[in-house]
Structures are given as structure tokens and as C-alpha cells.
Image (spheres, rainbow, N blue to C red):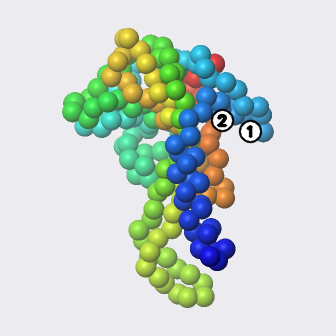
């Protein structure tokens, strides 16, 4: 088996395994220590509304992002962002009241986004296919007696190639959701 063939299979496999990993620690700041989130909470500081027929609303730079689809222009993919997610899409706008959620589980997640456009390659010219970039981040599974329909908060770092991929730190997560929510640990 050649090294190229081995690398072709190991990279996707390692990303899948990283996505399945269940972790209760997150890096506090860039280069900082990992901290435990066993008793963490997410405090929603103000009421928000999930847009009609959607299951999530995106948060970035302390505000709600419009739109709601990854790479739709609803937020800057090259900066950390989070999404509050609910269990259903069968609604005409779902209000979520300000409350405190217990973080019941922290799960590492990696999501591949594939561009389906034609690529220009210097030595070859134009080829069909696409390129793949990823988001690396965390699912924070949430529980609340007041808001039982809220499923989780998912936070991703920057949209990047595998060799540049890092999940967001707690500092980056709190910067993305500031004013709307806060991750406390």
C-alpha cells in the first residue's frame, strides 16, 4: 500500500473518529489549558426566536445571524460561530425564553463542506470535482425544564482545510455568543 493511498483513507477516518469522540474538556483560550465542563451551564441572557421551518439560529459577534444555512452569507464562516438548535422544524417561528441550560454532554464534531464547483489547477488546467474544507467544533447538549425543546448549542471554529483545523476555545465561543448567551464553567 502506498503512502498516498494510506493517507487518503487515514485522514477521513481520523476526522470521523474525532467527530464521534465524546469529551468534557475544551481549551480555555488559544494556547491555554483544557478545562473540564462537567458542571457547565449555558445562560441564555435574552429571548431569541428560531426562524420559521428551521431548527437553529446562528450567533456570531454577540448577535443573531440572519439566513441560517452554512455558507449562505448569513455569517462569516472564517470566524467562530454557534447555533442554538431545537428538536423540530414544524413551526412558524419558535421562541426560546431566556433561561439557564445544564450542559449534559460535550461532543467533539467535525463537519465536511464540499465545494461542487470546477477547480483550476495550475499544471493541468480545469478539472471537474471540488475541494473539501471543514468545521471543527463542539456540540453542547443542553437540558432545561423551562425549555425542553432546545436540543443543543453547536459551536464551530473557522472554515478551513484539515491541516488548519481547530475547534473554538471557550474564549472564542463566549465572544461569538456574548450579549445573547454565555458558557459558564
**Residue 1 appears anywhere in the view:** yes
Q: Determine contact: label 1, label 2, CB under 8 Å.
A: yes
Q: Percent x, y for residue 125? A: 53, 87
**Residue 109 appears anywhere in the view:** no
Q: Percent x, y for residue 35? A: 70, 26
Judged from the image, the secondary structure of the residue bearing numbered disc 1 is: loop
Picture quarter with the C terminus: top right
Name the quadrant containing residue 148: top left
Q: Mark 2 points at which residue?
A: 169
Mark 1 vs mark 2, CA separation in Å: 7 Å
Q: Percent x, y for residue 179? A: 54, 23
Instruction: Reply above or below: 56 against 5.
Output: above
From the viewer's side, name the closer residue of 65 and 98.
98
From the viewer's side, name the closer residue of 65 and 3.
3
Judged from the image, the secondary structure of the residue bearing numbered disc 2 is: loop
- Which label belongs to residue 30? 1
Picture quarter with the N terminus: bottom right
Residue at 44% x, 53% y is 71
Among numbered discs 1 and 2, the one appearing first in the sequence: 1
In this figure, what is the number of numbered marks?
2
Q: In this view, does 73 lie to the left or right of 103?
A: left
Residue at 29% x, 26% y is 94
Instruction: Reply above or below: 124 against 73.
Output: below
Disc 2: CA contacts within 10 A as few (<14), some (14-19) or many (>=20): many
Residue at 50% x, 22% y is 104
- Which label belongs to residue 8? none
Disc 1: CA contacts within 10 A as few (<14), some (14-19) or many (>=20): few
Residue at 54% x, 59% y is 12
Name the quadrant containing residue 39: top right
Q: Which residue lies furthest to the front in this view?
A: 1
Amino acid at each position: 500500500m502506498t503512502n498516498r493511498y494510506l493517507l487518503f483513507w487515514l485522514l477521513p477516518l481520523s476526522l470521523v473518529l474525532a467527530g464521534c469522540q465524546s469529551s468534557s474538556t475544551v481549551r480555555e483560550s488559544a494556547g491555554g489549558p483544557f478545562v473540564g465542563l462537567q458542571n457547565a451551564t449555558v445562560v441564555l441572557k435574552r429571548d431569541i426566536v428560531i426562524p420559521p421551518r428551521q431548527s437553529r439560529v446562528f450567533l456570531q459577534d454577540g448577535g443573531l445571524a440572519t439566513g441560517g444555512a452554512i455558507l449562505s452569507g448569513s455569517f462569516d464562516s472564517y470566524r467562530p460561530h454557534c447555533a442554538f438548535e431545537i428538536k423540530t422544524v414544524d413551526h412558524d417561528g419558535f421562541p426560546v425564553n431566556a433561561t439557564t441550560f445544564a450542559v449534559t454532554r460535550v461532543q467533539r464534531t467535525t463537519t465536511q463542506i464540499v465545494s461542487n464547483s470546477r477547480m483550476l489547477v495550475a499544471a493541468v488546467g480545469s478539472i471537474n470535482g471540488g475541494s473539501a474544507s471543514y468545521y471543527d467544533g463542539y456540540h453542547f447538549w443542553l437540558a432545561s425544564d423551562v425549555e425542553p425543546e432546545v436540543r443543543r448549542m453547536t459551536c464551530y471554529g473557522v472554515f478551513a482545510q484539515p491541516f488548519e483545523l481547530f475547534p473554538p476555545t471557550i474564549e472564542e465561543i463566549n465572544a461569538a455568543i456574548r450579549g445573547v448567551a454565555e458558557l459558564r464553567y
